[in-house]
Image (spheres, rainbow, N blue to C red):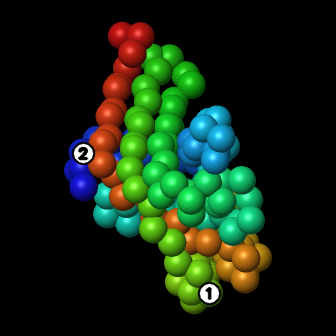
Amino acid sequence: MATITSECKEFLLQGTRTGKVATVRADGRAHVVPIWFVMDGDTIVFTTGTDSVKGKNLRRDGRASLCVDDETPPFSFATVEGTVTFSEDLNELREWATRIAARYMGADKAEQFGARNAVPGELLVRLTPTKAVFVKDLAD
């Protein structure tokens, strides 16, 4: 497991930046989609549908890459590559879906979104880093 620096974690958790998660389809084509996420230590935590393209790719291959960027000057980004594990436990899924919702939708809507996303057919995904890169202030 790679360690994510405290500066990189701070960047990843700042505001409501979405992550862009990349997976590999069965035929080798890349698949990239935006996600909402939080962190548990150095682990990236997000949810997805079991039958989504992303969910199917992750279950088949077990690897993912995540990119989070700041699109304003002087521009910064972080990438995290790693392996994934899953949980379909509805209590655990609700806990983390609520935390994710609090970050992106606010505390007042967190329970509502947590309940909506903690249902059968959803997966809790944990991305454990094998490599992490953080580049700050590219245009300075």
The outermost residue toward the top is: 140
Amino acid type at mark 2:
Thr
> Picture quarter containing residue 109?
bottom right
Residue 102: x and y, percent? 60, 66
Mark 1 residue element? helix
Q: Quadrant of the C terminus?
A: top left
Q: Of the numbered discs in the image, which one, if any, rests on residue 10?
A: none
Residue 135: x and y, percent? 34, 26
> Residue drawn 32% across and 58% down?
42
Query: Closest to the observer: 55 or 73?
Result: 55
Asked whether, in this view, residue 69 is left or right of residue 28, the answer is left
The outermost residue toward the front is: 27
On the question of residue 119 being in view, the answer is yes
- Between the C-alphas of marks 1 and 2, the distance is 31 Å
> Picture quarter containing residue 124?
bottom right
On the question of residue 10 being in view, the answer is no
Tag 2 residue: 5
Q: Quadrant of the N terminus?
A: bottom left
Position above or below: 126 against 132? below
Mark 2 residue element? loop
Residue 49: x and y, percent? 71, 66
Whichever of labels 1 and 2 marks the residue nearer the N terminus, that label is: 2
Tag 1 residue: 90
> Residue drawn 32% across and 34% down?
133
Position above or below: 139 against 18? above
Asked whether, in this view, residue 23 is left or right of residue 13, the answer is right
Count neighbours of disc 2 (C-alpha within 10 A) and say few if under 14, some if 14 to 19, many if 20 or more.
Answer: few
> Residue drawn 33% across and 33% down?
134
> Residue drawn 47% across and 43% down?
65
Amino acid type at mark 1:
Leu
Residue 45: x and y, percent? 49, 63
Query: Closest to the observer: 131 or 69?
Result: 131
